[in-house]
Amino acid sequence: MPLSPTQEQIINSIDNEATSSHWKDWKWQMRNSIRDLDTFETLLNITLSPDQRNVFNETVKKFPMSITPYYLSLINTSDMENDPVFRQSVPSHHELDIMKGDMADPLHEDQDSPAPCVTHRYPDRVLLLVSNTCPMYCRHCTRKRKVGDQDTIPTKTSISKGIDYIRSNPAIRDVLLSGGDPFLLPDDYLDWILEELRKIEHVEIIRIGTRTPVVLPYRITPELVQILRKHQPVWVNTHFNHSREMTQSARNALSMLADGGIPLGNQTVLLSGINDCPRIMKALVHQLVKNRVRPYYLYQCDLSEGLSHFRTPVGKGIEILESLIGHTSGFCVPTYVIDAPGGGGKIPVMPNYLISWSTNKVVLRNYEGVITTYKEPDSYEPTFCDRNCDSCDLLLKLEDADETKAIGIEQLLSDHDQTISLVPASNARHSRRKAEQ
Ligand SMILES: *Cc1c(COP(=O)(O)O)cnc(C)c1O
């Protein structure tokens, strides 16, 4: 595929000896990432005002910039300020506005880390941070506190310690490689990590979160796909935020992964001025599924410092879901989640469809606004579960039904656990009881 005129212009200003095969070499893209304002102006053939230059330079002191030549070439210079690619990649002075309630690490990822490189939040899965760098520094990064800190790869020793932690915890069945971007690791290093994880019997699946199909699609090479195939099942989750990012190069990268048998998902962040529009979001999810990518999550923008200008009210996300659910294919609809500050994990949010209910009937409304009823059974024989499958008539016989302890609301609903309430640790009434004893 030939390069676009903008790409020709960029590649020539970087190095007039370079050819389109350099352009399509991910390492060349990385070596020539744009990290300063002068290069940015030269490559796009634009000039910013002294004022704009000043704010830019102030901002990158705190939150650095890095953009691949490829992603830069997608910027529409005729309406730059409103361009979704520009807004996601080029620093804005709004990043220096720290609001009340903003936090450096809202998700408490550093506190919930029991071993190097590991964040362990949920019972059966962990995040393994294997790379400290990204091909493009997203302006809306939730780990903004770390961006540009050290563009290094965590050492084999620290990753090994993380893997040891996973090995010694049989409850972990799902490992998410994240970072930074795991696909910035050299092939053989990634191969080693996957191989070590695959040796652990209780690790059933490995997931990789990467934005390379969006910002560095040439990273998806036949060799990389070959490595992923070797360690199946491996799921890849990528991060498209706007249909403008679905270029022919991005499509090629996704096809290579999908043809290689890698299931693909997408995580979008809801961003003010970029994709906070039901029509933009519908176009995006349709582009994704056409390219065999299942929309997985739509994230409410986190409370990390420097992101206040990107945040929308939660109502915007609900409005977007309202425009998707029922209006388009079910698998086009992502789950809208708020990642709970303090490390509570992802909490799904959606419009209400259950309007009311009585003992044997529920009242629902559909996407068209039709109100309907569902008649429930008059008699229903619940199956009592004490987690002993021998005494149960259902056909699934699990050998060890103790694999995980029920927690949270699941615990309150279960037959086998006698807990009747969950009480916050700081409950004043309960502290008084203790004091009286
Ligand atoms: C998002 C996340 C996961 C994975 O959550 P899923 O809902 O299973 O996709 C696991 N660990 C941490 C720390 C996370 O932030």
Image: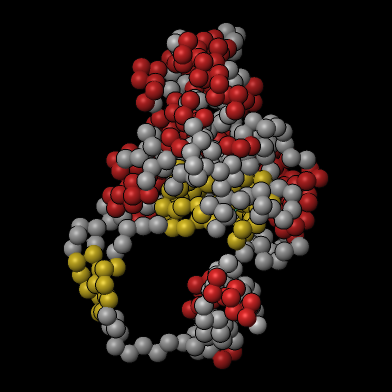
Number of numbered discs visible in the structure rendering: 0
Question: Considering depth in this image, is 49 or 45 the residue closer to the camera?
Answer: 49
Q: Examine the image and state in which quarter residue 167 appears.
A: bottom right
Q: Examine the rendering and report whether any part of residue 237 can be seen.
A: yes
228 versus 2 height, above or below: below
Do we see residue 71 in this rendering? Answer: no
Q: Residue at x 61, y 37 (%)?
A: 145
Q: Is residue 308 left or right of residue 24?
A: left
Task: Name the residue at 29% across, 64% down.
Answer: 353
Q: Determine the residue located farthest toward the front in the rendered image.
A: 436
Which color scheme does this rendered protein use? Answer: secondary structure
Q: Where does the image place residue 161, in percent across and percent down from the top left?
A: 78, 51
Residue sticking out furthest to the left: 370
Task: Please tell me whether residue 17 is drawn above or below residue 76 in the rendered image.
Answer: above
Q: Position of residue 310 (x, y in %)?
A: 43, 37
User: Depth check: 16 or 85 in front?
Assistant: 85
How far across and how far down the image is residue 12, in percent? Answer: 54, 10
| Residue at 59%, 86% in the rendered image | 388
- In the figure, 415 relative to 352: above or below? below
Horizontal placement of 391 versus 334: left or right?
A: right
Q: Residue at x 29, y 88 (%)?
A: 378
- Residue that protrudes farthest toward the top in the picture: 16
Which of the image's four quarters has the C terminus? bottom right
**Which residue is nearer to you in this view: 120 or 21?**
120
| 84, 16: nearer the viewer | 84
Above or below residue 383? Residue 245 is above
